[in-house]
Amino acid sequence: MKQKHILQAKKRTLLGKKVKQLRAQRKLPANVFGNTASVSIELDEIAFTKTFAAAGETGLIELTIEGETTPRPVLVTNIAYHPLSGKLLHVDLQQVDLKEKVTAKVPLELIGESVAVKAGGVLLALHDEIEVEALPSDLPEKFVFDISGLTEIGKEYKVSDLQFDRAKIEVKLPPEEVLVLIQEPKKEEEPVVVEPVETETTVQGAKKEGEEGEVAAEAGAGAKQPAGKVAAKPAIKPAAPEKKEEKKG
C-alpha cells in the first residue's frame, strides 16, 4: 500500500519581489494550477522538503489550504532553486482529477551489486527515468532494478524486464528499449610510432648531393692541367697615367 502524503498551506498575499519576506521566515512561495483557477499559496519550507523527499514527482499529495474543507490532490511538477546557494525558491503544484490519466516521469533506481562490474565491467545506465501514463493514484513512485542479475559482459535489462501492473500503467518506451547494460572497459590505445622510410628518390638525391659536393671540392682545390698545356696567366692592365695638377696663377 502506498504511503499517504499530506501537506498544509496558506493562501499567499505577498507577490512579486515581496516574496523575499516569506523566504526570510522559511516560508516557500508556491502556485497551484490545474482543473481550477491558479491559486498562490505559501508552504512551510521544512515540511515541504520532507514531503517531497518521500513523494517525489509521482507521489500523490493531499494539499489542504487554510480555509478549505476538502484536500486537493496535487503532484509536484516544478521546483525552482537558487543557482548559487541551491536554496528552494518556488514550487509549482498540479491539481489532478483522480479519474483522469496523467503523464509523469518515474525515476529508475538501481540496487544490488554486479559480479561483472566487480570483474572490471562498466555499468551503463541509458535511462535514469521513464515516462509513463496512469491514473494519479496508480503512478509508481519509482522503478527498481536489481543489477545482481547482470553477471557477465553484454548482459542487459530492457523495458520488458520492468515489474509493474501493465493493466494500470502504460510505459511510453518500446519493450525492447535497453535501460541498463554491462560493457567491456575501454582499452587505452598505445601511440603508434611511425619510423621514416628511406625511399629510392631520397637515396639518389643524397648521392647526387654528395657527387656535387665532391666536384665543388675538387674545383676549389684546383684541378690538374692536361699535359703540354700551360695555364694562362691573368691579363695585367696598364696603370692609368697620373694626372698632373695645374698651378693656378
Image (spheres, rainbow, N blue to C red):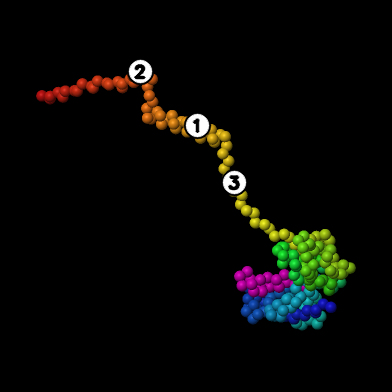
* Percent of width and height locating residue 122: 71, 63
Q: CA distance from mark 2 to mark 3?
A: 58 Å
Residue 88 in view (yes/no):
yes
Which of the two labelled residues, at mark 2 and mark 1, occupies the earlier sequence position?
1
Q: Main secondary structure of the magenta part?
A: strand
| Number of the label disc, if any, that sits on residue 208 | 1
160 in magenta: no
What span is colored magenta in the figure? 74-94
Q: Amino acid at mark 3?
A: Val
Using the image, determine if residue 25 lies above or below residue 86.
below
* Percent of width and height locating residue 31: 73, 73
Using a 10 Å C-alpha cutoff, classify the residue at mark 3 as few (fewer than 14 neighbours), some (14 to 19) or many (20 or more). Answer: few
* Percent of width and height locating residue 178: 79, 61
Q: Amino acid at mark 2?
A: Lys
Q: Amino acid at mark 1?
A: Lys
Q: CA distance from mark 1 to mark 3?
A: 27 Å
Q: What residue lies at 72% left-to-right and 67% top-to-bottom?
A: 118
Residue bearing mark 2: 229
Residue bearing mark 3: 194
